[in-house]
């Protein structure tokens, strides 16, 4: 069986959805498939806006809600007819009425708990999957709707549930033994053991595809999006970026962790464990082969696979003469981060041990600083640690590639380019696997640095 996942942009309008329905029908002719869908393009953002407005006591949320209802009604009207249309409309109305009640509750109490927040977000995928199932039935196909919350079990982390693979896999396997026609699965959403709605994190529908793919031992997981696969850089920023035909799981993981939004990072792990290839395809250019992610990569002449970036980070710097030669400091720093739930994206430690700096999401910067001040209260008092600083408006640009290993001159080329551009490097890190060189620079320099690096690594290949 093959898993096909369609992202929001691929199903944003009735015309786009029609193209996707054709692709689904074509794939059905080649064998058994299951389909994972995102919310219609922009719908999750729309739900977030409604929550924020309702939670802030703004009446405007009801205007946004009407636009939301109309978007779904347009899909129903454009793509279904007759009694099926009416049944679908009634069923969608039950969902939207319930959503309206929940939003009203948020508006009245001026507060939204994480549990309610993610319950509201789940409506995007629940509605799109319902509508798409009906559209396929309208075309005479045998399609069934699956609410992934009945299958994918997570812990109580409502916004980024950690999946219990054992339970999830057995739920899915049991179901698929009985159901052989095309299943239309809600991406992104899951439930905890109390059957409360959780989500897998923004962009999480890719992960849903891998979770189902692994459980059914799929032959391939196809991620259908709006670009020609994984490109050497984000095509929105670097015009000359080109598609990479073959890529290893490791490089794909590295690219996505460092900002290539085209695939959600956790997606790679389950596919890699089960040895299932992932193919990234373009719904706007379906004949193009796209990128195949698997065990084999390809020998890139450029020696690097791609250039990515995380466009907004803060750097926490902890420094002081009292840190020199002290054992256990790094352990204490990162334990303090873990205990305060702060994720660390990059670490740079000078060999003089005089200062350590690490990158965090800007939203977590104050929490990180407060946690360090508490942990090192004593050292700060006796001046062993002089300062804990936050540096803002930074980004991380990463040069990624399996073939960088044992290839001299890559970092030289990177730093020459930065020097020629007159860009100040705030921090540097290289993964011990040598698959990644990351540099922290000002956000203002992000795009021009990426363009210049792309030019030097991909356009000026002399070997
Ligand atoms: P979907 O709605 O299909 O899930 P996403 O917006 O999540 O699509 O991901 C596709 C987008 O990822 C592209 O439109 C592109 O702007 C962005 N992107 C960032 N880096 C890369 C890259 N290296 N290769 C391809 N796309 C990238
Ligand atoms: N709809 C969700 C989001 O926008 C999940 C996804 O599209 O993958 O984040
Ligand atoms: Mg996506």
Image (cartoon, grey):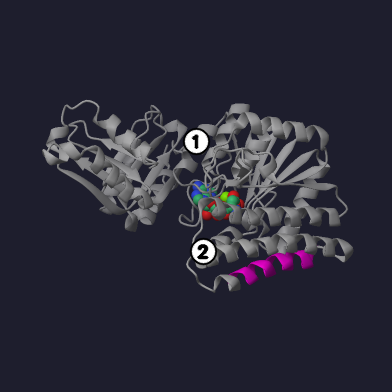
Q: With 357 as the anchor, is 320 left or right in this view?
A: left
Residue 25 is situated, as x and y percent measured from the top left of the image, at 80, 49
- Residue 303, quarter of the rendered image: top left
Q: Looking at the figure, which quarter contains the N terminus?
A: top right
Horizontal and vertical percent position of residue 447:
39, 55
Q: What's the mark number on residue 251?
A: 1
Q: Secondary structure at mark 2?
A: helix
Where residue 393 sits: x, y (%)?
32, 55
Which of the 4 quarters of the picture holds residue 135? bottom right
Give the CA separation, mark 1 to mark 2.
Answer: 46 Å
Residue 243's place in the image compared with 247, above or below, is: below
The residue shown at (64%, 43%) is 195
Q: Is residue 72 magenta?
A: yes
Mark number, residue 8: none
- The residue lying at 32 percent from left, 46 percent from top is 440
Q: Residue 27's spot in the image, x, y percent?
A: 77, 44
Give the residues drawn in magenta, as a range: 64-79
- To which quarter of the image does residue 74 belong? bottom right
Q: In this orientation, does residue 418 appear?
A: yes
Quick check: can you spot residue 416? Answer: no
Q: Secondary structure at mark 1?
A: helix
Q: Residue furthest front?
A: 109
Work out whether 399 lies above or below 99: above
Q: Which of the image's four quarters has the C terminus?
A: top left
Which of the numbered marks, if any, corresponds to residue 109? Answer: 2
Horizontal side of 404 relative to 379 (left or right) equals right
């Amino acid at each position: 069986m093959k898993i096909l996942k369609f992202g929001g942009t691929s199903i944003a309008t009735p015309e786009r959805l029609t193209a996707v329905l054709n692709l689904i029908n074509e794939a059905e002719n080649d064998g058994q498939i299951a389909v994972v869908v995102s919310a219609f393009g922009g719908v999750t953002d729309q739900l977030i806006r409604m929550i924020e407005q309702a939670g802030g006591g703004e009446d405007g949320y009801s205007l946004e809600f009407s636009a939301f209802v109309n978007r779904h009604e347009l899909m129903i009207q454009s793509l279904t007819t007759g009694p099926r249309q009416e049944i679908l409309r009634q069923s969608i109305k039950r969902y939207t009425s319930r959503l309206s009640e929940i939003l009203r509750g948020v508006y009245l109490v001026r507060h939204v708990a994480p549990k309610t927040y993610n319950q509201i977000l789940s409506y995007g995928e629940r509605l799109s999957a319902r509508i798409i199932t009906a559209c396929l039935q309208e075309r005479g196909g045998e399609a069934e709707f699956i609410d992934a919350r009945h299958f994918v079990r997570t812990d109580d982390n409502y916004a980024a549930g950690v999946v219990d693979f054992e339970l999830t896999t057995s739920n899915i396997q049991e179901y698929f033994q009985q159901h052989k026609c095309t299943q239309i699965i809600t991406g992104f959403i899951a439930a905890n053991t109390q059957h409360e709605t959780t989500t897998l994190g923004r962009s999480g529908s890719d992960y849903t595809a891998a979770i189902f793919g692994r459980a059914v031992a799929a032959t391939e997981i196809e991620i259908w999006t709006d670009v020609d696969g994984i490109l050497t850089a984000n095509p929105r920023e670097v015009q000359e970026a080109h598609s990479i035909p073959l890529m290893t799981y490791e490089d794909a993981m590295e690219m996505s962790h460092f900002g290539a939004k085209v695939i959600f990072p956790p997606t790679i792990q389950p596919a890699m464990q089960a040895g299932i290839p992932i193919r990234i395809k373009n719904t706007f250019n379906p004949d193009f082969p796209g990128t195949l992610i698997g065990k084999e990569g390809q020998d890139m002449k450029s020696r690097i696979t791609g250039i990515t970036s995380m466009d907004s980070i803060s750097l926490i710097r902890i420094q002081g003469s009292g840190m020199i030669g002290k054992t256990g400091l790094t352990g204490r720093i990162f334990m303090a981060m873990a205990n305060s739930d702060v994720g660390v994206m990059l670490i740079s430690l000078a060999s003089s041990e005089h200062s350590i700096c690490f990158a965090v999401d800007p939203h977590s910067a104050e929490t990180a600083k407060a946690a360090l001040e508490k942990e090192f209260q004593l050292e700060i008092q006796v001046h062993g640690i002089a300062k804990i600083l936050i540096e803002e408006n930074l980004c991380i640009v990463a040069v990624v590639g399996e073939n960088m290993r044992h290839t001299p001159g890559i970092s030289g080329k990177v730093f020459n380019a930065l020097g020629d551009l007159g860009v100040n490097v705030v921090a540097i890190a290289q993964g011990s696997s040598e698959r990644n060189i990351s540099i922290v620079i000002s956000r203002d320099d992000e795009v021009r640095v990426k363009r210049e690096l792309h030019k030097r690594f991909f356009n000026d290949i002399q070997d």
